[in-house]
Image: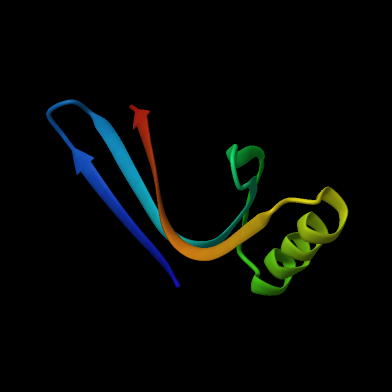
Amino acid sequence: MTFHSMVVTSSTKTTEENYIMQVYVVIGGYDYEGCDFSSLKLFDCKSAAEEYRNHLQDQWGYDYVHLQLESVNLASKVAH
């Protein structure tokens, strides 16, 4: 589900746009070293996230791989 909101502030003449979307987060890690952020990827498609999770488990030898659904808020300010 994707939400979009737009706020216009006339005093600063800046438009702020916020996009809130849900993404699948996949990251691998090692028991004693923690998460390997170089493996971190975000997906909008669950099957693609599961495929990447399996790739990390099979090809990279991580001790664990997390896959979870998270909400992400993307904000942008555009000056006028």
Closest to the observer, 43 or 77: 43
The picture places residue 70, in percent across and down from the top left corner, at: 45, 61
77 left or right, relative to 37: left
Identify the image quadrant of the C terminus: top left
**Res 51 quadrant in image:** bottom right
**Which residue reaches farthest right?**
59
66 left or right, relative to 20: right
68 is higher (above) or lower (below) than 76 = below
Q: Residue at x 30, y 40 (%)?
A: 16
Closest to the observer, 13 or 39: 39
The picture places residue 64, in percent across and down from the top left corner, at: 65, 57
Closest to the observer, 23 or 76: 23
**Res 14 quadrant in image:** top left
Q: Residue at x 63, y 39 (%)?
A: 36
The picture places residue 31, in percent across and down from the top left corner, at: 60, 47
Identify the image quadrant of the N terminus: bottom left
